[in-house]
Image: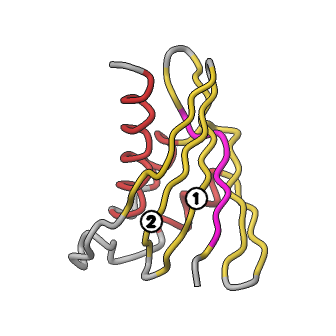
């Protein structure tokens, strides 16, 4: 599989983690040292992967169980060696987000190393 396809699969895994409220998939998509940072309704948020995984898992029933449509779109993907930046538009919990996902390739595996998010009003 080519790098771009691996990164796109990583984005899909990330979104599936949200849709299924799966902490396990969050840990699979993100590097262990990753940070999730942004503003949600004006409040600054900065989470570790464990904190984010706990938040995602707490969304019960999951969006999938509630038959919520998956809404996500990669708007750009730029690869530079063993790093990549992906811009993603998504809807999660009824909120529209624009995410900047930084990927890092470690041992031929692409993982999200940083997620910056912005809520679209």
Q: Position of residue 105 (x, y in %)?
A: 58, 23
Q: Is residue 44 left or right of residue 67?
A: right
Residue at figure coordinates x 36%, y 47% from the top left: 12
Say which residue appears at 36% left-offset and 37% top-offset. 9
Q: Position of residue 77 (x, y in %)?
A: 51, 39
- Does the magenta segment cover residue 115? yes
In front of the other: 32 or 118? 118
Q: 10 Å neighbourhood of mark 1: few (<14), some, or many (≥20)?
A: many
Q: Is residue 39 magenta?
A: no
Q: Residue at x 72, y 60 (%)?
A: 37
Label at residue 99: 1
Q: Earlier in the sequence, mark 2 or mark 1?
A: 2
**Position of residue 116 measured from the top left corner of the image (x, y, whole percent):** 67, 57
Which residue is at a point 25% across and 79% down the rendered structure image? 66
Residue that numbered label 2 is attached to: 90
78 relative to 120, above or below: above
Image marks 2 and 1: residues in contact by CB distance under 8 Å: yes
Q: Label 2, label 1: how many angstroms apart (C-alpha)? A: 8 Å
The quadrant holding residue 102 is top right
What range is drawn magenta here? Answer: 111-118
Q: Residues within 10 Å of mark 2 (few under 14, many from 20)?
A: some
Position of the C terminus, as image quadrant, is: bottom right
Residue 11 image offset from top left, x and y in percent:
43, 45
Is residue 39 shown above or below 110?
below
Q: Secondary structure at mark 2?
A: strand
Which is nearer the eye, 100 or 26? 100
Question: Which part of the image, by quadrant, shows the N terminus?
Answer: top left
65 lies above or below 50: below
Q: Quadrant of residue 104?
A: top right
**95 on left or right of 83:** left
Please, what secondary structure does the residue beneath circle 1 have? Answer: strand
Residue 56 vs residue 71, the one in the foreground: 71
């Amino acid at each position: 599989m080519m790098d771009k396809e691996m990164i796109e699969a990583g984005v899909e895994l990330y979104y599936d983690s949200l849709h299924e409220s799966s902490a396990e998939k969050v840990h699979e998509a993100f590097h262990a040292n990753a940070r999730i940072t942004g503003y949600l309704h004006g409040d600054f948020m900065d989470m570790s992967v464990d904190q984010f995984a706990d938040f995602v898992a707490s969304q019960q029933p999951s969006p999938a169980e509630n038959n919520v449509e998956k809404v996500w779109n990669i708007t750009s993907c730029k690869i530079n060696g063993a790093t990549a930046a992906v811009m993603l538009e998504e809807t999660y919990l009824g909120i529209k987000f624009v995410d900047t996902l930084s990927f890092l390739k470690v041992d031929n595996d692409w993982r999200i190393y940083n997620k910056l998010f912005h809520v679209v009003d």
